[in-house]
Amino acid sequence: MKNKNFNKGIVLTALGSFWWGVIGVIYFEYIAFVGHFEVVLHRCIWTAFFLLITTSFFSKWKIFLIIIKDYKVLITLFFSGFLIFINWAVWIYAVANNQIIDASFGYFIMPILSVLLGNIFFKEILNLKRKISIILVVISIVFLIFVSFKSIPWVGLIVALSWGFYNLLRKKINVDTDVGLLIESLFILPFALVAFYLIVQEGLNDFTFSNPSLLLLLLLAGPMTVIPLFLYVRGVELCGLGPTAMIFYITPTCQFILGFFYYNELFSFTKFVSFILIWIAVFIYLKDLYEND
């Protein structure tokens, strides 16, 4: 049963990671003309709305009530909700401003942080091969920073830190995946609604009921957010931070490819070398996982 759950977690994480790396990038880049601030608000609002529907459909309100009675869990979800909001905001900013590759750099960093957090807080094992893979990725990141960026890539760092610590908090409390996401989104919702009201008052909004096609397009921000997040968080719960962190490299790899080949962003030889080093590390780590788990 343990091995079955582990394999299921790997599959779910891979699906969620691919969604973020390809489908999510294409969708949020396509609606970027609305403006990244309004897109972030729509993502928060419609994610909460979509989760209210799924919670009712799957009859999970009893689970919801149990969770909100546990103040320790509720506080943790408040902070994890804050972290996911930061992650959404910075990532959408990057997509809207032709910095998809820079954002993907953050997602290359994040799994390293998750592996270390998994080892520190959950005693997930790091044998020699896993340590070698981590060292290779660290080398590639250092190489990328000092040779290619030559400065601190703040977009990537914020993306990595917010998502890495979000995963840690969710792993610690062990709540139902989608209900936990609902509570997080409900914490964010009041702020998003107030902000949206203010931009409407100023006449800065693109979202109107007189434009049904745009309305429907922005409504999709809910399921486009919930589906991959549910897949990934559930994967973390089933097989741990370390394994899912390495699988997550599907996301930044796809983002790199889209950013370079489809959106014509700069992809230097330095970044290519770093990209190769990271995938060697991923191969070593995954091979070790299947040999020992």
Image: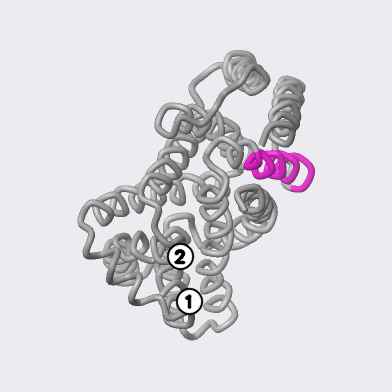
Q: Is residue 160 magenta?
A: no
What residue is disc 2 on?
178
Question: Which residue matches tag 1?
Answer: 54
The label on residue 293 is none
- Front residue of 181/146: it is 181
> In the picture shown, does residue 37 fall above or below 193?
above
* Residue 217 position in % (x across, y down): 58, 73
Q: Label 1 amino acid?
A: Thr
The rendered magenta stretch, by its main secondary structure, is classed as helix
Q: Where is residue 203 in the image (x, y as percent from the top left)?
A: 36, 70
* Residues drawn in magenta: 247-262
Q: In this view, does 211 lie to the left or right of 66?
A: right
- Image x and y of residue 44, in percent: 41, 63
Splitting the image into 4 quarters, where does residue 98 fall?
Answer: top right
Which amino acid type is marked by label 2?
Answer: Asp
Say which residue appears at 43% left-offset and 46% top-offset. 171
Above or below, 231 against 277 in this view is: below
Can residue 188 be seen in this snapshot?
yes
Q: How crowded is mark 1: few (under 14 residues within 10 Å), some or many (20 or more)?
A: some
Determine whether, in the image, residue 247 is placed left or right of residue 106. Answer: right
Residue 166's quadrant in the figure?
Answer: top left
> Cβ–Cβ below 8 Å for labels 2 and 1?
yes
Q: Distance between the residues labelled 2 and 1?
A: 8 Å
Considering every residue shown, the one lying at the far front of the view is 1
Q: Position of residue 113 (x, y in %)?
A: 49, 30
Extreme residue in the right direction: 261
Query: Looking at the picture, does residue 288 appear above or below residue 19?
Result: above
- Dot 2: element: helix
